[in-house]
Amino acid sequence: MTGSDSGLVGRPVVPPKRLRPSIRDWLQRNATLVAPAVALVCLSALFAVLAPDTFLTPGNIRNILSQTSVLAFLATGVTFILLVGEIDLSVANVAVLSGVISALMFSGIPIRIPLVGSLNIGANNEAVSIAVALVLGVVLGLLGGALVARLGVPSFIATLGVMMLADGLSYYWSQSRIIYDLMPMSTSLGGTSWGPFPAIVLSAATVLVIAHLVLSRTRFGRYVYMTGANRAAAELAGVSTRRVLLQVFVVSALLASIGGIINVGRLGSAEARTGSELLLPAIAAVVLGGTSVFGGVGGIRNTTLGLLVYGVLNNGLDQVQMDIYLKPFARGAFLLTAIVFNIAALRIASRSRAELVRTPDDSPARTPRRWFGRSGAPK
Amino acid sequence: MMQAGTDATSVASVRLLDITKTFGGVRALDHVDFDVRPGEIHAVVGHNGAGKSTLVKCLTGAQRPDEGRVEVGGTAVEFHGPADGISAGIGVVYQELSLFPALTVGENVLGPRALGSRWIRWNEVWKVAAEHLAAVGLDMDPRVPLAQLSLGQQQMVEIARALFSGAKVIVLDEPTSALGLAETKLLFGTLHSLAGKGRSFVLVSHILEEVIENADRVTVLRDGKLVRTMDVAEVTKSQLVDLMMGTDAKVLRSTYEGDAVTLPPASTAEPILEVKDLVAPPMVRGVDLTVRAGEIVGIYGDLGCGHIQLAEAIFGLLRTTGGSVVMGDDLRVARSPTHARDAGLGFLPPDRHKALAADQPIYRNVTLAALHRIQGWLLDPKAEEVVTARLIDELGIANATPKRNAGQLSGGNQQKVLLARWLVHPPRVLILIEPTRGMDVHAKSEVIRIVQRLQVQGVSALLVSTEPETVLAMAQRVLVMHRGRVVAEYVDCRVDKRTLVEAGA
């Protein structure tokens, strides 16, 4: 090798053209994943110190994962919705409705339908009960999606309406009854363990993996990202953004329905009253993971981290000595702090890209600052 | 310079003296004088980039001049914002109306001033509004929602609002581009009657007949410089075109005559896209055109002539109310962009930001329109990156790798990414709107080269532009649009920029 030195004499020394391939660089570009990961580690460390005997035990970790699992079904659907830049407020109530109606049908309680009479099918028939619950979820998803995609109703309003419908149906059909006669499918998925892992954790993980593959490896997933990134651009390229919108609302409702059916198994009973409080945690978990509410940025990896952060936060607060009435405040304070970090991360991520590709031929184009508002406003 | 006091007619209502305004090294206005007399309609004409809008902005206070001064009624003033302009008696009616469609006509006329005192006296509001509406020839109930009015009527409401706010000089920016003939007539009737009562108007317009018929004086701007201000009675349309083009300078004359292009004889290839009597209100008023196989058809027209809306209507972005678009057997009038794309149309919009997902990698932007053609429902991003890398290479997109975000590229390179989008699976007809606007000469010639290469591959193109040189550089057949219709067609002949500009004015 030394002999070749002489051959290079007189040639300009050209440094290898590399774009700073360092760890720091990697961290910057993946800042939206790094931020929630750091939050997860810090928070876990904090609670491990504050509650050394209870927090980091295998039993408690299993607990955290189980507690988070139902949320995972809802949060996965919400991820699809936020990625297109919309919101779905109906997920928790659609979940409750699906849990309630499947339990009602399975236990042979007739479903009353005004003007038609009552429907009594699927008693002791799991397949029919589940199918009806899922179909009902899909119908509600189609309703919300159609209002948004076809009529242009803001998703906040459309899904608020669907949320009320689902809530109303749960109460009307159950008549506030608590049903303990649950489907074996619900109880086995919601309440048993497969080996060391609770079944509900495994099913949530499966859903997350499938959703990740759908979003990152299918045409539909790509359309979701592009529609959220710039709806007008997607439309001008011939993507039917209305169809994409309709589809994500159906996906969200379907996942909520599945989550609802499993959740009754975890709780041991089906009731119209419990479950609707999961809405805000589901949205919070997605946002905590770093998925942008303006669409196009984020994904299931983010949501997985966000779910873990939320789970650790909730569980950890229960383990420390603190006025229980101060806990919601502590949760809120932490959520806000984490969101601020996420915003900083988004900024770092887009700035690092700008630095890497500064164009010499003319001025570098600026990245829109999405977190302050929608860029590329739809027509 | 200080002749205001000695002016025989009267003191000017507003006067700009020796105004210079620079934006990032470009002189938008270069030592320009401009004045508006009481009771006159003063037109401002010039091509895109001549400095018309900067002049208007200096006049209304939206921009502060770097040099020179502004006088209102003979005294020097300094505007710090549009509010200062309004309080000095200068109102503006913008191209895009700035009214509140959800409010009533009356509330729109009075604007925020309706809420001036602690309590709103509605009877007073309706009475005052009705008076001002009557002044612009609108006899109507001010309690009607504004959204129920036609575009022309809304423009009158804007003028009424300017009158109410005490405007003595009202600037109208392209007021008639979206109006029908009857409404245009009505508008100018109102302007003349108000001018008779001492109000002045500054009319910024591309439509020269309109200027000659209605204005008292006309100011011609070119490249930020004042060419001349003269009485309209002294000029003809053709002289105005000369002044706008700069034919008085011999050097320029030789340049533009050198730009003359010989268009080939009419193509006899089979028609691919046939548009028949297409109507898309308010801008497209019945257009016929045919694009044949392997042909680049150019449509030249000024801003507001409706050619951009025509292109949007063909691609399914605008609702049409009449006529037909036929592409083989696949497409009658496109219901949506998806429908248009699947029938074999491609579309490059005038606004890059609208078509580019800046926060997404280049490869996702490039493959977006043809994803369903090159891949199944399961994606293979590696294959997408290969396709993208090849196109980056072929089109010479600088500083690009497939995974880099599209927003990080320069404007010209972003445009190439958008062109690459339609090269992945070439359409039968590619609609290009202002494909080279705002680019330097090098980037322009590269875009032209890409389009010509597409043509060799058998892709036809419909090229829509407000720049005559762009149309001449690419098209084999040139149509000129004016007020929503095709008014001239050039094929098998020699044409130059001037011919097109005059036909479209």
Image: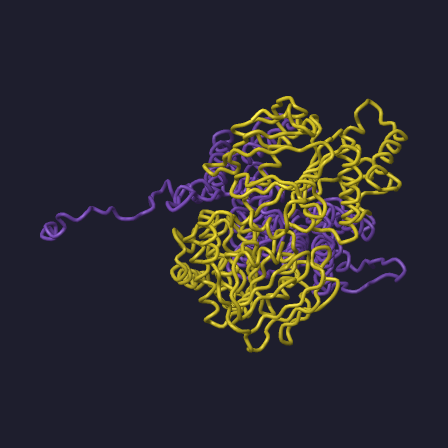
Q: Position of residue B381 (x, y in %)?
A: 46, 60
Res B46 seen here: yes
Q: Position of residue B380 (x, y in %)?
A: 46, 63
Q: Nearer the viewer, residue A114 or B348?
A: B348
Q: Is residue B399 above or below residue B134?
A: below
Give the chain coloured yellow: B
Q: Quadrant of residue B232?
A: top right
**Which image quadrant: the N terminus of chain B?**
top right
Q: Is residue B60 above or below residue B274?
A: above
Q: Position of residue A236 (x, y in %)?
A: 59, 58
Q: Is residue B108 above or below residue A172?
A: above
Q: Quadrant of residue B52?
A: top right
Question: A104 left or right of A185?
Answer: right
Question: B98 left or right of A240?
Answer: right
Which color scheme did the rendering employ for the protein? Answer: by chain
**Which image quadrant: the C terminus of chain B?**
bottom right
Q: Colour of chain A?
A: purple
Q: Nearer the viewer, residue A260 or B143?
A: B143
Q: Position of residue B135 (x, y in %)?
A: 83, 37
x 52%, y 46%: residue: A302
Q: Is residue A322 above or below residue A93?
A: above
Q: Nearer the viewer, residue B215 or B103?
A: B215
Q: Nearer the viewer, residue A52 or A67?
A: A67
Question: A99 left or right of B77?
Answer: right
For the image shown, how many numbered marks are present on the structure? 0
Res A187 seen here: no
